[in-house]
């Protein structure tokens, strides 16, 4: 079952990168968020302040969700830790309109 949030909620999306059981920072890290309408926003660590490194190999991005439906996100690491992680969550429609 997908995690569920109301429209207007602040949602924290995160990923951990590991090589042979050891937390590792990839050479580059990107996070992509796809809204239900198909719009994709890409964040690059070191360029976009929204993509944050919390600890070695641990990154997060936070978004305020603005549309009902299934949202997807993907973290991509390259170089010394080439890996990818994807997940989805659901945003509930509001009885108070599109903006909640």
Image (tube, rainbow, N blue to C red):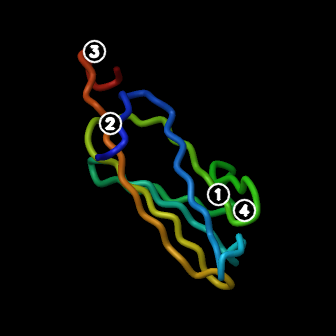
| Label 1 element class | strand
- Label 4, label 3: how many angstroms apart (C-alpha)? 38 Å
| Label 3 element class | loop
Which dot marks residue 91? Answer: 2
- Please report whichever mark, 1 or 2, sits nearer to the chain's N-terminal start: 1
The residue that label 3 is drawn on is: 96
Which dot marks residue 46? Answer: 4
The residue that label 1 is drawn on is: 59
Residue at x 72%, y 62% (from the top left corner): 46
- Label 2, label 4: how many angstroms apart (C-alpha)? 29 Å
- Please report whichever mark, 2 or 4, sits nearer to the chain's N-terminal start: 4
- Please report whichever mark, 1 or 4, sits nearer to the chain's N-terminal start: 4
For the residue carrying disc 4, how many other residues have a C-alpha within 10 Å: few (<14), some (14-19), or many (20+)?
A: few
For the residue carrying disc 3, how many other residues have a C-alpha within 10 Å: few (<14), some (14-19), or many (20+)?
A: few
Asked if labels 3 and 2 touch by Cβ distance under 8 angstroms, the answer is: no
Residue 35 in the figure: left or right of residue 16: left
Residue at x 54%, y 77% (from the top left corner): 83
- Measured as percent of width and height from the top left, residue 63 is found at 51, 41
- Please report whichever mark, 3 or 1, sits nearer to the chain's N-terminal start: 1
- Label 1, label 2: how many angstroms apart (C-alpha)? 22 Å
Image-quadrant location for residue 79: bottom right
Q: Residue furthest right?
A: 56
Asked if residue 68 is positioned above or below residue 45 in the image, the reply reads above
For the residue carrying disc 2, how many other residues have a C-alpha within 10 Å: few (<14), some (14-19), or many (20+)?
A: many
Viewer-side label of 1, 4: 1
């Amino acid at each position: 079952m997908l995690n569920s949030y109301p429209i207007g909620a602040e949602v924290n999306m995160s990923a951990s990168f590991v090589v042979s059981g050891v937390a590792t920072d990839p050479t580059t890290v990107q996070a992509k968020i796809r809204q239900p309408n198909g719009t994709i926003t890409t964040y690059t660590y070191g360029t976009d302040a929204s993509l944050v490194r919390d600890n070695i190999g641990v990154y997060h991005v936070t978004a305020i969700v603005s549309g009902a439906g299934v949202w997807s996100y993907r973290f991509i690491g390259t170089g010394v830790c080439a890996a990818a992680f994807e997940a989805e969550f659901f945003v509930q429609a509001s009885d108070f309109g599109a903006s909640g």
